[in-house]
Amino acid sequence: MTPAGERYTTERLGPRLTIVDPSGRFLFVANWTSSDLSAYRIDQATGALASFPGSPFPSGQNPRAVTIDPAGRFLYTADWGSATISGWALDPVAGSLRPLDGSPFPTGRNPRNIRFTETGDFGFVSCAADAVIAVYRRDAGTGRLTNLARVPTAARPRSAMVDPSGRLVLTAHEGSTVVSVFRVDPRGHLTPAPGSPFRAGTDPRFVTVDPAGRYAFVPNQRSNDVSGYHIDAETGHLTPIVGSPFSAGRRPFQLVLSPDGRFGYLANEKSNTISAYRLEPTTGGLVPVLRHPAPAGRRPVWPTTDPSGRFLYVANRDSGNVSGWSIDQATGALAAMPGSPFQAGRRPRAITVVPSGRFAYVANDWSSDVSGYAVDSATGVLTPVPGSPFRAGTIVATV
């Protein structure tokens, strides 16, 4: 897999309040309450942020997440309150955004995010209130979205996940016990996989697929475990992995896999811990690598590895900080970084590490700003960059 492919696969793991473009030169933040998008240049020497002229840019109502197409040319927000997708063209030379012709693009009610196939030709949006996945064709030259279909699915779909092959779309259903899978044909049309929807635990939230596209994992927030599945590459059918469901802490939030797919890390939101696993390459089983989960701050969310897979970070929502660990490359075990946890703003979430691994950023909901850090290449320790924190729009998200 190419470095660009690795970055894009990582972006697909969950809804993103904050995202860095594939070049690592620009940072974008979706601002829920002020219904706009903050855009920044990243100083490549220091990591400091400088706002684009005209930032923040108006979006639809309550943008929930921001996505960049695989080539890094176009930017989209899923506008929860107005049932739209807003789009912009990114000029990397001028450091500017221009609204796409036809934007905002209508979708179903309560869109969560838009996810693209690896080529960027097709995008998929889970619409929670309408229980549909909206399908779009993206014009490669203009970025304009054309709606192809609204495909019914089970109630309250979470963000759609596109597998690495671009041939499957997977989504969990909040408050249910099921996960849906659809096959993508060459025209972008969706067809339910045989047997879909598939049984999960109670209240599944986010689907994570390993980099090879062989296994899928879904944390279940009310049964406090992780469902694991073999993926049939041709049909999309899911078969439970032996040993599934796998034990977790209280209210497991999301599982992130290391870039090479050997290890997995799960934020347990109510246990205030991180569970660490080794992924069995032949069976897909999750084998705990720690006798006890690693302690984090209060309400850890959105675990994130750096691009090298040597460091793990998690934003602690109720502690106002970020915990960091080094990852043992032989076993996957975690060791707390010196100085961890690192101070952030109020209610941090969605930490993002740039593709080079040199800088990291976290959006802070309640202080409506972005904390920026330089990443020590040897230890992973985070040090505030000059000028941090940086003002954003009004980020606060209530759902």
Image (spheres, grey):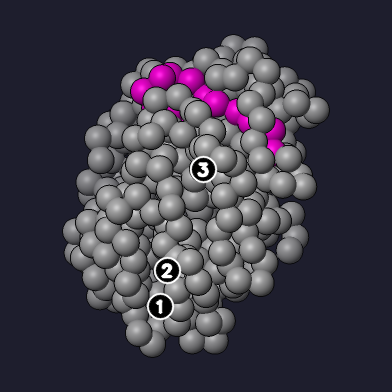
The amino acid type of the residue labelled 2 equals: Leu
Residue 171 in the image, given as x and y percentages of width and height: 37, 65
The reply to whether residue 159 is in sight is yes
**Dot 1 alpha-carbon crowd within 10 angstroms: few under 14, some 14 to 19, many 20 or more:** many
- Residue 319 drawn in magenta: yes
Q: In this view, does 299 lie above or below 67?
A: above
Depth check, mark 2 against mark 3: the one in front is 3
Disc nearer the start of the sequence (2/3): 2
Give residue 170's mark. Answer: 2
Give x and y (percent) for residue 100. 45, 53
Question: What is the spatial separation of the Cα atoms under label 2 and label 1, in whole angstroms?
Answer: 6 Å
Mark before the other along the chain sequence, 3 or 1: 1
Label placed on residue 35:
none
Q: Main secondary structure of the magenta part?
A: strand
Residue type for callout 3: Ser
State left or right for residue 45 relative to residue 273.
right
Is residue 350 in sight in this rendering?
Answer: no
Q: How many marks?
A: 3
Q: What element carries label 2?
A: strand
Q: Name the residue tied to disc 1.
A: 182
From the image, tell me which residue sits under label 3.
Answer: 275
| SS at circle 3 | strand
Image point (43%, 48%), residue name = 248
Q: Position of residue 201 (x, y in %)?
A: 32, 61
Specify start and end residues of the magenta stretch as a single range. Answer: 315-327
User: Compared with residue 244, is residue 371 higher up or lower down, i.e. above or below?
Assistant: above
Question: Which residue is the extreme one toward the right?
Answer: 378
Residue 80, horizontal then vertical, whole percent: 27, 48
